[in-house]
Image (cartoon, rainbow, N blue to C red):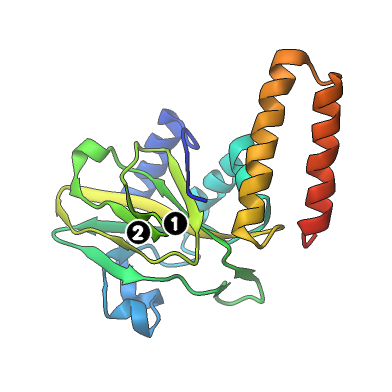
């Protein structure tokens, strides 16, 4: 399942985050690349664990914790601390797949990458190119979202970022280990939860159908969840 989650960060939060990021020191993005990615990756990245990355990453994690749509879709067990990249002057990232396991440097923290996430941090009108292109059974989906919006998609997907030919593309990216490993099962739970919320708004939480479907949701979650 691929999902657009709008407004993860508000305008004031984006401004504050950009002030921190724009004054930070960036390095070659291949500092964190594997062999496959290094051959196709051209961008800049904030060093993992830098003060700027930690400050903005903490703000993003706080925002995610308040976002009901993110929780319903991802059912997160672990979230890798957000990383940050920047594309300009023809930078791009060729077709690749994310590593199945992500390790946090200098620690024993590790995440099975069930889901990949990108939060856009630049106005899409301020740069040309820079589309995130994600491949699935139904073709290639091209994503370029307003600042503060997030796209969530299976980490197993082949994807690439088209070259930025004008302006600067700034984004945060990270991975989620879900309580429900299987993407199809997660998608069913998300659709069921969304329908329950709509029925709840129309008929109230004590409506017999709402109560029955809520029980079904939680019983399926018990069956499929790792934790």
Estimate how packed mark 1 is, as few (under 14), some (14 to 19) or many (20 or more) residues with alpha carbons within 10 Å: some
Quarter of the figure with residue 62: top right
Label 2: few (<14), some (14–19) or many (≥20) C-alpha neighbours in 10 Å:
some
Against 53, is 4 above or below?
above
Q: Which mark is residue 186?
A: none
Q: Quadrant of the image for the C terminus? A: bottom right
Horizontally, is 172 left or right of 108 in the view?
left
Q: Which residue is tagged 2?
A: 85
Residue lying at 29% horizontally and 57% vertically, measured from the top left: 86
Residue at x 41%, y 59% (from the top left corner):
136
Q: Name the spot of residue 69 as percent of width and height, x first.
A: 60, 37
Q: Single out the residue that lies furthest toward the top.
A: 203
Local SS, label 1: strand
Badge 1 is on which residue? 173
Task: Name the one closer to the observer, 201 or 174.
Answer: 201
- Residue visible at 46% across and 63% down in the picture: 50
Q: CA distance from mark 1 to mark 2?
A: 8 Å
Vertical arrangement, residue 106 with respect to residue 123, above or below: below
Residue 181 visible in the shown view: yes
Question: Which quarter of the picture shows residue 106?
Answer: bottom right
Q: Which sits in the foreground, 24 or 189?
A: 189
Residue that appears at 26% across and 50% down: 169
Residue 91 vertical placement versus 66 (above, below) = below
């Amino acid at each position: 399942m691929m999902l657009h989650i709008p407004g993860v960060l508000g305008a004031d939060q984006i401004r504050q985050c950009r002030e921190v990021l724009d004054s930070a020191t960036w390095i070659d993005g291949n500092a964190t690349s594997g062999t496959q990615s290094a051959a196709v990756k051209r961008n800049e990245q904030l060093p993992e664990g830098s003060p700027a990355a930690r400050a903005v990453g903490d703000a993003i994690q706080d925002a995610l914790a308040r976002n009901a749509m993110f929780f319903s879709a991802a059912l997160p067990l672990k979230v890798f601390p957000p990383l940050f990249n920047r594309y300009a002057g023809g930078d791009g990232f060729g077709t690749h797949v994310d590593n199945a396991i992500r390790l946090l440097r200098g620690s024993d923290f590790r995440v099975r990458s069930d889901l990949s996430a990108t939060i856009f941090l630049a106005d899409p009108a301020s740069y040309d190119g820079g589309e995130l292109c994600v491949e699935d059974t139904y073709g290639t989906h091209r994503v370029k979202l307003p600042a503060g919006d997030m796209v969530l998609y299976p980490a197993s997907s082949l994807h690439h970022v088209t070259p930025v030919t004008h302006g600067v593309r700034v984004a945060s990216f990270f991975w989620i280990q879900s309580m429900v490993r299987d993407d199809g099962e997660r998608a069913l739970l998300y659709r069921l939860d969304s329908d329950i919320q709509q029925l709840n708004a129309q008929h109230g939480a004590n409506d017999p159908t709402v109560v029955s479907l809520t029980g079904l949701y939680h019983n399926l979650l018990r069956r499929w969840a790792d934790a």
